[in-house]
Amino acid sequence: MADDKELRYDPATIEPKWQQRWAADPALYAAEPADCGKPKYYVLEMLPYPSGQLHMGHVRNYSIGDALARHMWMRGYNVLHPMGWDAFGLPAENAALKNNVPPREWTLNNIAGMKRQFNRLGMGFDWAAEVTTCLPDYYRWNQWFFLRMFEKGLAYRKKSKVNWCPDCATVLANEQVIDGRCWRHEDTIVEQRDLVQWFLRITAYAQELLDGLDKLDGWPEKVRTMQRNWIGRSEGTEVDFFLEEKVDQGLGTREQGLEKTRIRVFTTRVDTIFGATSVQLAPQHALVASFTAVDPELKTLVDEMIEQQKKAREAGDLGAIEKHGVPTGHFAINPYNGERVPIWIANYILADYGTGAIMSVPAHDERDFEFATKYGLPIQQVIRPEDKTMSVVLPFVSEEGVLINSGEVDGLSCAQAEKKLQEIAAAKGFGEAKVTFRLKDWGVSRQRYWGTPIPMVYCQSHCDGDGPLPVPDDQLPVLLPDKIEITQQGGSPLSRVPEFVNTTCPKCGGPAKRETDTMDTFVDSSWYFYRYTDAKNAKAPFDSDIVKYWFPIDQYIGGVEHAILHLIYSRFWTRVMRDLGLVENDEPVRRLFTQGMVIKDGHKMSKSKGNVVSPDEMIEKFGADAARMYSLFAAPPDRDLDWQEDGVAGVSRFLGRVWRLTTKYAPVARAGRGQAVDAPTGLSLKLLRKLHQTIAKITLDFEGRWHFNTSVAAIMELVNEIQAEDAQLAAGDVPPPVMRELLRSLVLMLAPFAPHLVAELWEELGEESSVLRAPWPVSDSELAREDELEVPVQINGKLVTVVRVAADADAKTLEAAAMADEKIQGRIVGKMVAKVIVVPRKLVNLVVR
């Protein structure tokens, strides 16, 4: 056996050695062809933004996926484990402004640095599948997809109120506004502006996106709930109230027979419409502008309401706004009974939700009741309980009732009345049954430079009436200029680059202008995982047959903060590609795992908080394996991890113990090669039992529980038990074939967590093949079975003692052992044992009176 000096664990020597070997073997982590005969496994972590440096929060995310990929390779799967870069985006422009470095240069330099860090960490990525979204070979297909959506009416342009971040100097999608603030700048209030924008019609798939969530049983329920709430399906009725015309208010008159002004409201309770005592409009409703145009006092009050809504958005809780309203002096006609109801403007009605107008039924809605009570509006009950003897306290909001004071639907149930009233509205042309969604179309225009150019042009001569025209496919990609002056003033920087803007019309050949907006960077991440499967394809986004083999993704790993932004977009994009005939799957991801955050100094580890810990620093001090393994050991992977550098040091010490144990007894293990393990007894049986129990536990963890923290703890317990017998091991009490199985299996179980150390120890054990292709150890259930167990015994639920029994003892044997125990006998003297509860192998509880 080696002397103590040779047993020192030195990651600074071991890790670079193996990183160089792995880099020289590009096939090591490469996915195999579809006809390889192995089952496929596609494991993927969300691709990073190349912001400059990885921190330990990144390390945790990618260590989870890397451990799983390595385990699946050892289980005999054909594994695809790629990596790429979400490389367009605002930080590159901000860095360019700050450092006078072109965004492309800044981004590609960061990619090189982060790739070096990944390799230094020993991550097992298939770099042959690498994707960089800011390069033309990728973003040309963003443009190609955009054109296909334009052809199908899924990409369109309109003037709209948009979310504007002053710090980003660009538009944000609704999903990028969190509590009224920018998702990137948490302290920046988002403004509302009117701009002409490009949209993708995600609402065309709203119902399918909602229905699909029921099939995603491999996703966390919290993510599915977040998406359900964001899609926000409501079933109800749209009904037109009619504005009562007032000539003397300057609104003008309408010729007899012409269409009256309609005020469309959406309600989920049309059965209560006979109890409507007012109509309320959002301050930004189109009709309000006509009212305020002739009423300056009303305009002042409306402006105040808009300011109240703005402050509520800033506070992040529109629902908590103190409800205010003002009467307009105008009236609307209820189409069902012809009654006049006053029109109010209310600060809690939102222009971008529903139709921007509601009917107020205070007798049957808590919010409406509060408003009516505050302003003295009438309260008309139109629903009573089915049981006439029940007393009613208003507001009565139950949907289980009978209509009263409701004309021809009197006496009907709420459900019957709803159906009847919808039929009447449809027949008379003033309404219809309607399903609405909270989900809005995805605004993808960005007034920035560093993004995919939108491939549309505007003819300046003969075709100017045709609207935007698509760039022909054979002219793709529309290249983003490399060098450009970037400012945050005056719209897109591209508009000030004549050689980019000026082009020819694809229809008439005359002069034309290019679209100068670029695409939202979430376009890039909506389909990148398909490109990974065929990353070098220059003729198509990917080969459909290759995608068919790999999809859906078997395991996707990333933060829950992307539950709406990224994941709902990717589900939409998959359905668009399916309808284009490119893919056959409806969903991109079979199983989703959302890891916890790394917390330091009370905050999520991030550059913006200034609390990042560099993996380079941890590698210098403790080695890459210790840094990776700590991120998996310190907390369950779905929980937040409180950063403690001492924990990394502790893991490093443990790896040193594994090194010393294995190298010390490697000669014995090598001597056992080719020898069978005879029926073990004594110490050999004890250690093999612990080994196979550990194999069973870790295998179970990888198959679904993912309690990698307890997996590592189980390996530590195994090492402790082996080292506790060092004297007997040194004396040769454990034969070579048993020692070989112990050390070989220990190293294999560590392989997903500490790849460098394991590669070195695998070689030390005399193995010549790659440990990555070595079969995962299989637990022997007979060896893992305990001969005896310690079972706790309770009296009235409180632990009194434990009894030792055979592992297969039945309930009667367990009960007899408990009753015979001296401690139990002493506690039950003179008392009655009313009941004995026995859970075999687990528990005995005596109910004593």
Image: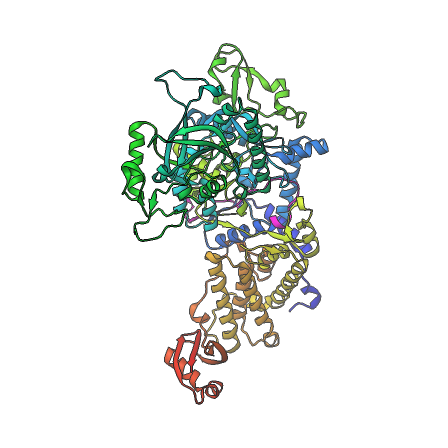
User: What residue is drawn where x is 52% and y is 10%?
Assistant: 461
**Image-quadrant location for residue 187:** top right
Predominant secondary structure, magenta span: loop
- Asked if the magenta segment contains residue 46, the reply would be yes
User: What is the x, y in percent for residue 312?
Assistant: 57, 40
User: What is the x, y in percent for residue 74?
Assistant: 49, 55
Figure coloring:
rainbow
- Asked if the magenta segment contains residue 86, the reply would be no
- Provide the residue span drawn in magenta: 29-58
Location of residue 492 with respect to 389 vertically, above or below = above
In the image, 85: left or right of 580?
right
User: What residue is drawn where x is 67% and y is 30%?
Assistant: 102
**In front of the other: 429 or 547:** 429
**In front of the other: 555 or 823:** 823
Location of residue 456 with respect to 771 vertically, above or below = above
**In front of the other: 23 or 324:** 324
The reply to whether residue 32 is visible in this rendering is: no
The N terminus: image quadrant: bottom right
